[in-house]
Image: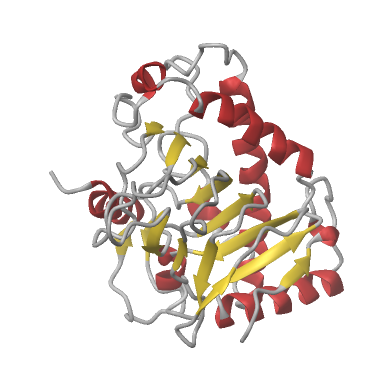
Amino acid sequence: MACIPVVDFDVYKLGISNVSDQDLQELCKDFYKAFTEIGFVYLKNTGIDPKEVSDVMDNSKKFFLLPEEQKRPSSRGSYTNNGNHGWVSSETESLNPRRPGDLKEAFNTASLCTDIKWPSDDLSDFRDIQVGFFLRCKELSLRVLRVMALSLGLDSEVFLKAHSHIGSDENGSTLRTLYYSPVKAGSVKEGQLRCGEHSDYGSITLVFQNPEAGLQVLNRKQEFISAPSIPGTVLVNIADLMQRWTSDVFVSAVHRVLLPPTGDLSTRQSLVFFVQPDDDAMITCCDGSDKYPPVKSVDYLLERFEDSYGRK
C-alpha cells in the first residue's frame, strides 16, 4: 500500500531567494511523482516553524472554547464583504452532503479587512495571529505552485498569474482553523464523521495537524490510507480546479476525518489553507485540450459551497 511521500523543501524554503536548477529539477521530479500518483505530499523544512503552527492553534482554541453566544456574532454569513468569512458551528457543514453535518467547528479567515468585526473577547490578538499565518501560507503556496508548473514543463508563472489577488476580496483563498471537540458516546448520528469524504475545491491545500489521528486519504486503488501528523511538516494536496487545469495529470484525492475510537475524548485541531485562483480566473485545460469545459474560479467555488452548506 503506497504511503504519502515526504519531500525535503529546504532548498526553496521561505527566506531562500535563489535555488539552483539542479535542486529545482529534483523538487519537480518529487512533486510530479507525488501529485500524479496520490495527490498528496508532506513537505519538510518549509520555513514555517512548528511553534508558529502551535501558536495559531493555541490562539484559535481560546476562541472555540468561548460560550456559543460569544462566537455567534462572528458567524459565517455575517460579513457583507465576504460570505465565507467567520465562525462555522458544529454540524453546520456537510462536506459529504449525503452524511449528517460534520462534527467540527471552524473559523474561516477569508477576508483580511481591518474594518470588519473580529472576535475580541479576551482575544485582542486573534486577527493579527490569523492574518499573519495566512500571509505565511500564501508565500509558501506561491512557491509550491511555481514548482508544480515547472514539473509539468510549463512556464513557471502560469499558475501564479491566476493567484495574484490572494488576500483580497477578489480571491477566495481561506485559512480555516478547525476544532474537533470530544465525541461523546450516544451523541453521534448514523453515518456521521468528524469530516465527511470530499475533495477540495481550488488549486492546492496546505494542512497542518496536531498529533490526534483521523485524517485518511483515498489512493488510486480506492483504499483509504492514514495521513498522520508528521512533526515539522505541512501536508500539501491537489484540489479540484488544479485537476481540471492539468487535464487529470495531477490528482485531487478524496479524504475524510474519522471519529475517534469509542471512549477516546481527545480533541483534534488543524490549520488548513485553501488556495483558490482569483475570482475572475477562467480555468481551462493547460494542455489545450477540451477534457473539461472552461469554468470561472468563483463560480465553481460557490457551487461547492452550496453543496456543503445546503442549497437555498
* Left or right relative to 84: residue 42: right
Q: Nearer the viewer, residue 258 or 137?
A: 258
How many numbered dots are placed on residues in this image?
0
Q: Which of 292 and 105 is in front in this view?
A: 105
User: In the displayed structure, would residue 267 be above or below residue 81?
Assistant: below
Expressed as whole percent of the image width and height from the top left, the position of residue 7 reads 76, 69
Q: Which of 60 and 172 is in front in this view?
A: 60
Q: Residue at the spot x=34%, y=51% of the render?
A: 188
Q: Which residue is at the far left?
A: 312
Query: Which percent across, then down, holds residue 3?
Result: 65, 78
Location of residue 293 in the rendering, given as x and y in whole percent from the top left corner: 28, 72
- Residue 235 can be seen in this image: yes
> Can I make out residue 201 in this image?
no
* In the image, residue 308 above or below residue 2: above
On screen, residue 237 versus residue 21, left or right, reads left
| The C terminus - image quarter | top left
Residue visible at 24% across and 54% down in the picture: 307
- What residue do we see at 40% from left, 38% from top? 170
Q: Is residue 16 left or right of residue 32?
A: right
Q: Quadrant of residue 39?
A: bottom right
Identify which residue is drawn at 52% across, 67% down.
216
The x and y percentages for residue 99 are 27, 59
Judge left or right: residue 154 versus residue 80: right
Closer to the camera in the image, 305 or 119: 119
Q: Quadrant of residue 38?
A: bottom right
**Dividing the image into 4 quarters, which one contains the N terminus?**
bottom right
